[in-house]
Amino acid sequence: MKPLRLGVNIDHVATIRNARGEAYPDPARAAELALMAGADGITAHLREDRRHISDRDIAVLADLTRRRGLPLNLEMAVTPEMEAAALTHLPHAVCLVPERREEVTTEGGLDVAGQYNRIAPLVGRLRQAGIRVSLFIEPVRPQIEAAAAMGADVVELHTGAWCLSVRERTHEAHQRFSALRDGAVLAEALGLEVHAGHGLDYETVGPIAALPQIAELNIGHFLIGEAIFVGLGPAITRMRRLMDQARGAPAPAGEAAA
């Protein structure tokens, strides 16, 4: 079974910083700690309203990850402003996501099938600049097929609805997980690398990590929240251990069971 990577999203370190208009806590320091704790890369979302990550943060994170030889995954909307930012900083990867000013967080997948003619040219320009392109989508056939047709490297399947149904113990959980499983199989068959993310926590990470087609999980809000109680390093270490256990990989020597 292929290795499973963990990308840690550090957006909400910046949210806390911005609440007071101070320079602390520093997202770059969180990124360093995440990498030391076993993260395989850093994810950050540069939003139109700059509610958390700033342009300066992206510049610093791009330099930090480049020096460490590890990837920065820049989440961004499909806009000329964000395209310019990506082409300026040249992150390892860009993940195109839907974005609305009034939303609290990303509420669903990008409609790549319905906006094919708008998104496909941007995918081409980013790839031409040497940036891997991921599309954050719902695990449904039309979106996955459109992503493959427009030449994306990766799809990141939206796990948020499934995670919510698990936490609320609703009857949709089984159906939503089946859609994620089938979507991962289809995406891999079409030549796409498969990632997953949104809403994952210690309870929900195992079933997703066990899907053999998944190459990477991107997790942020839960880890930053858990860090308030146990510290960022231990929170990431436990998540990494649960991922490895679900994949059947041995935990690093000396680590106690969760």
Image (spheres, rainbow, N blue to C red):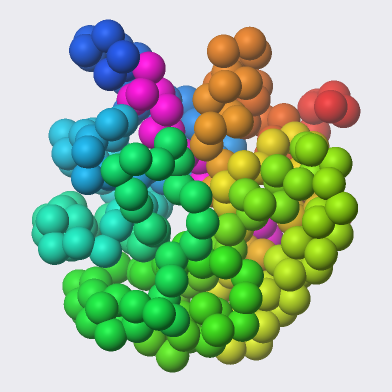
Instruction: Examine the rendering and report whether any part of residue 251 can be seen.
Output: no
Stretch in magenta: 1-16
Question: Does residue 4 appear left or right of residue 175 in this picture?
Answer: left
Image quarter for residue 194?
bottom right
Between residues 235 and 35, which one lies in front from this camera angle? 235
Quadrant that contains the N terminus = bottom right
Quadrant that contains the C terminus = top right
Q: Position of residue 4 (x, y in %)?
A: 66, 57
Question: Does residue 149 appear left or right of residue 89 in this picture?
Answer: right
Q: Is residue 27 above or below residue 248?
A: above
Question: Does residue 85 appear left or right of residue 113 in this picture?
Answer: left
Question: Does residue 47 appear left or right of residue 56 in this picture?
Answer: right
Between residues 131 and 218, which one lies in front from this camera angle? 218
Q: Is residue 82 above or below residue 131?
A: above
Q: Residue at x 31, y 14 (%)?
A: 19
Instruction: Examine the rendering and report whether any part of residue 200 can be seen.
Output: yes
Is residue 6 within the magenta segment? yes
Q: Position of residue 179 (x, y in %)?
A: 74, 70
Is residue 20 within the magenta segment? no
Image quarter for residue 176?
bottom right
Q: Is residue 124 above or below residue 204?
A: below
Q: How many marks?
A: 0
Q: Residue at x 30, y 76 (%)?
A: 119
Q: Residue at x 28, y 85 (%)?
A: 117
